Amino acid sequence: MEAMNKAFITEPMDTGDRNCPRCGSLGVPVPAETLREHLLPDALRNLSETAYFCPFARCEVAYFDMFERIVQVELLARPVWPKDVDAPLCGCFGLTCDDVEDDLREGTPTRVRALLARSKSPEARCTIMAADGRCCMPQVQRYYMKRRQE
């Protein structure tokens, strides 16, 4: 049998895509500092430093790692959106769904615009305060537009 030239063998690519072991949703990679902020110490010890947030609101899993170890929502240090609809949409500045509803009732997105300005400021700490480690503005804008169309 002939030896195969390694130049023609394709290694599987690790795209970093990980799916929640419970619901199958694509997980959002989160930095270790996000985990330290949102997990109680016992729960933190159960995950590797490379972990993912499950963004599916109805899934009981908050975080998971590539070994399929999970941390359920009930083990979070505090409620987070979208897992808890009463939690703030914005972990940094506390904007809530009720604030967005008030903007809609008043006919102008005053609070949403103020959040947009603040989200670009040095006081925004999305990597730490947001459960998924990302800026909340895309989620806030989606929520605003969805409610506006209803």
Image: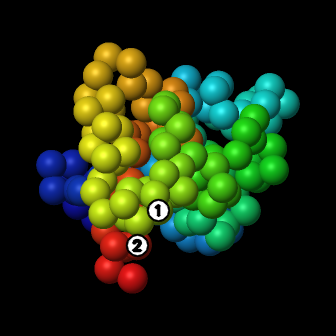
How many labels were placed on the picture? 2
Which labelled disc corresponds to residue 40? none
Residue 76 visible in the picture: yes
Which residue lies under the disc numbered 2? Answer: 147
Compared to residue 146, the image places residue 3 above or below, namely above
First in sequence: mark 2 vs mark 1:
1
Which residue is depicted at the point 74% across and 52% down? 73
Q: Quadrant of the N terminus?
A: bottom left
Q: Quadrant of the C terminus?
A: bottom left
Visual colour scheme: rainbow
Residue 14 visible in the picture: no
Left or right? Give the position of 124 relative to 21.
left
Residue closest to the far front: 106
x and y percent of residue 100 in the render?
44, 56
Which residue is depicted at the point 43% across and 31% down? 126
Secondary structure state at the residue bearing disc 1: helix
Dot 1 surroundings within 10 Å: few (below 14), some, or many (20 or more)? some
x and y percent of residue 28 in the render?
46, 50
Which residue lies under the disc numbered 1? Answer: 101
Secondary structure state at the residue bearing disc 2: helix
Compared to residue 115, the image places residue 107 above or below, namely below
Which residue is depicted at the point 63% across and 49% down? 87
- Which kind of residue does numbered mark 1 sit on? Glu
In this orientation, which residue lies closer to the viewer: 120 or 57?
120
Residue closest to the far right: 42
- Which kind of residue does numbered mark 2 sit on? Arg
Compared to residue 97, the image places residue 136 above or below, namely above
In this orientation, which residue lies closer to the viewer: 56 or 64?
56
x and y percent of residue 21 in the render?
64, 64
In this orientation, which residue lies closer to the viewer: 94 or 101?
101
Residues at circles 2 and 1 in contact by the CB criterion of under 8 Å: yes
Left or right? Give the position of 11 relative to 84.
left
